[in-house]
Amino acid sequence: MSNSSNLYNNLLKDAIENRNKLSNKTIVEIRKLYDNVANDLVKKLSTAKGGFTKAWLADYERYVRYKMLELDNELIGLTRDSIKSSAEIAASVQGDFINYINNKYNLNIDNKIIQFAYNTNSKVIGQIIQGDFYKDNRSLSDRIWTYSNGTMKDIQYVLAKGMAEQKSYLEMIKDLEKYVSPGAKKDWEFNKVYPNLKNKRVDYNAQRLLRTSMNHMFYCQNVDNAKNNPYAEAMHWQLSAEHGVRQVNRFGEDECDDYANNDYYNLGQGNFPINKVPVPHPNCLCTQTIIISKSLDEIGRELGQWINGKDIKYLDEWLKVA
Ligand SMILES: [Zn+2]
């Protein structure tokens, strides 16, 4: 591997770590949001002094709806920001790479080009948020609303069942608490009493959506970087270090093994033309690395000559895009 590929892919590795740190941190925030809603819902339920009359429950449902709308808005904002940050983290790989070469060889590359290297693809950000990226075309907010609808139905179900079975006031509060608290463990007994719950864990969907959309964004921006890097020749499917333990030993090989072990395009094993890299499946931990065959010295020399007026066609093209 050339030292330029090495540099680029090390920057990529750091970026992936940063992205994972950010998604873990955001998931803690998501959990807090659910915790707060859970506290409010339980507190409000405890105020039913006159017992759970139909009128009181109708009122309570309105309160639940209001709390869920509030939660939705916060989740949408949080997830949207995280998608944008994921794009920025991925784009920084390209920016830092060009910047490194610029400094190492004192090139004085036009600031416009350096900025271009750090740019995120706002079109793809929009497609992931608006849903055009996905086959079902569903937007981020639409998905989050659907989760909340499920949660609201579940809450109604728990309360209706408790009333029908004439559970005590305290039992009903305890059951609701068990359902709405992201941290509370729903034991076998609970799931047996409420077999028709849509969500087994109240915050699971929001967490999964956050991770998946951040990963999709990162993948798209990473491919976009390669497209806009005049020295990138191909991309390489690199299996995650945990692929053997998490996937192969337990379930056998999956499509990632196909991608990593085949040479579909005569570019070498596991290599793909930049516009043909497959989209990773959900929860995939593989990395799409970049292949650059020119060394840092060669790239530095060439860029230097180009800046000093030499005609280099693909660098002229690059300037046009920037
Ligand atoms: Zn994979």
Image: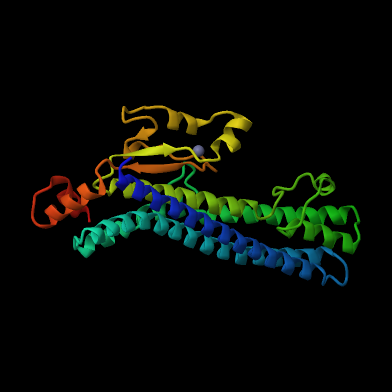
Image location (x, y in percent) of residue 193: 84, 47
Image location (x, y in percent) of residue 128: 44, 51
Q: Residue at x 60, y 54 (%)?
A: 206
Q: Is residue 273 left or right of residue 24?
A: left
- Of residues 6 and 225, the one nearer the viewer is 6
Q: Is residue 6 left or right of residue 295?
A: right
- Of residues 80 and 108, the one nearer the viewer is 108
Q: Is residue 303 left or right of residue 38?
A: left
Q: Quadrant of residue 236?
A: top left
Q: Residue at x 32, y 58 (%)?
A: 95
Q: Residue at x 36, y 27 (%)?
A: 264
Q: Which color mode does the image show?
A: rainbow
Does residue 125 show up?
A: yes
Image location (x, y in percent) of residue 211: 54, 51
User: Disc count in the image?
Assistant: 0
Q: Is residue 35 above or below residue 250?
A: below
The quadrant of the image that shows the C terminus is bottom left
Q: Is residue 209 above or below residue 34?
A: above
- Of residues 21 and 154, the one nearer the viewer is 21
The quadrant of the image that shows the N terminus is top left
Q: Is residue 100 left or right of residue 73?
A: left
Q: Residue at x 44, y 32 (%)?
A: 260
Q: Quadrant of residue 60?
A: bottom right
Image location (x, y in percent) of residue 228: 27, 49
Does residue 132 show up?
A: no
